[in-house]
Amino acid sequence: MTSRAADRQIDHGSAGTTDPAGTTGSAALSARRWFLVASPVLAGLFAVLGAASDPAVGKDGLVLWRAYAENPDALQFKAFGLHWAFAFWLVPPLLIAGLVRSRGVWIANVAAFLGFVGISTLPGLLFVDFYDSAIGQVSGAETTAQVNQAMEGMWGVPAMAVPGLIGFVLALPLAAVAAWRAGLVRWWAPIAVVAGYVAFSGVATWNAVLTTVCFSVFAYELARGTRPEAPA
């Protein structure tokens, strides 16, 4: 099955279940499609905002918490940016699952589940930054360190954070592979996604810019592979 043949099968299947009149270019379906296409790009752009605003890049421990306490405005932009970066990052696995109906369907199912686990956990964890900053402002970075040390003894913290991190790491690459298997995107789309992850590992501004470029390649492939057929 060629890529375009798979696209037609998927497009027709979607239209058959959601649009009895057969008008595949409906505003609702178009909005859903563009939300999918835009999400990887928005993830990258918000990641750039978060990375550029981080007042403690490359720091940890007391130095990091002191920087958070002394720079609450920059910290809020950092947390806000990364919150939405992680949220948009995990939208495609949830939406791609509904498009994959041939090869790759089980991969898409796993990706959607991992995307749910990630999006329900990881974006919200950025709220901890606000607490770290506020505690440091009120009682000093040493108190922030003591609070974080106390939290390390709570089993619920890793029980919530680790699955979210696993979902974040695996969901989008698996969704890209599923989309490739189904003929929605070409072979380099999953490679672009993985390259975006590798670039983001540094969490500096230029890393986030490279991630945005890589994710834009993936978004282009999604736009190309999910465009509706022109009416006969």
Image (spheres, grey):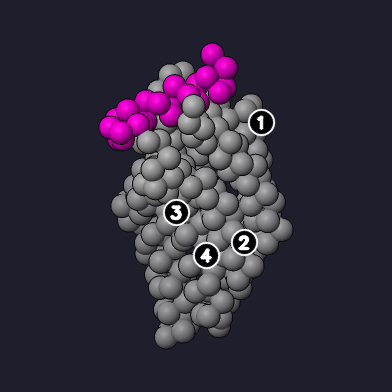
Labels 2 & 1 near each other (Cβ < 8 A): no
Q: Which residue is mark 2?
A: 48
Question: Along the line of sight, which residue is nearer the eye, 2 or 147?
Answer: 2
| Disc number lying in front (3 or 1) | 1
| Disc number lying in front (2 or 1) | 1
Q: Which residue is mark 3?
A: 87
* 10 drawn magenta: yes
Query: SS class of the residue under badge 4?
Result: helix
Q: Which residue is mark 1?
A: 188
Mark 2 or mark 3: whose residue is earlier in sequence: 2
Mark 3 or mark 1: whose residue is earlier in sequence: 3
Give the distance between the C-alpha atoms of the residues marked 1 and 4, in whole angstroms. Answer: 28 Å
Labels 2 & 4 near each other (Cβ < 8 A): yes
Task: Specify the amino acid type for callout 3.
Answer: Ala
Say left or right for 213 vs 146: right
**Crowding near pointer 3: few (<14 within 10 Å), some, many (20+)?**
many
Mark 2 or mark 1: whose residue is earlier in sequence: 2
Q: Which residue is mark 4?
A: 81
Q: Position of residue 128 (x, y in %)?
A: 41, 66
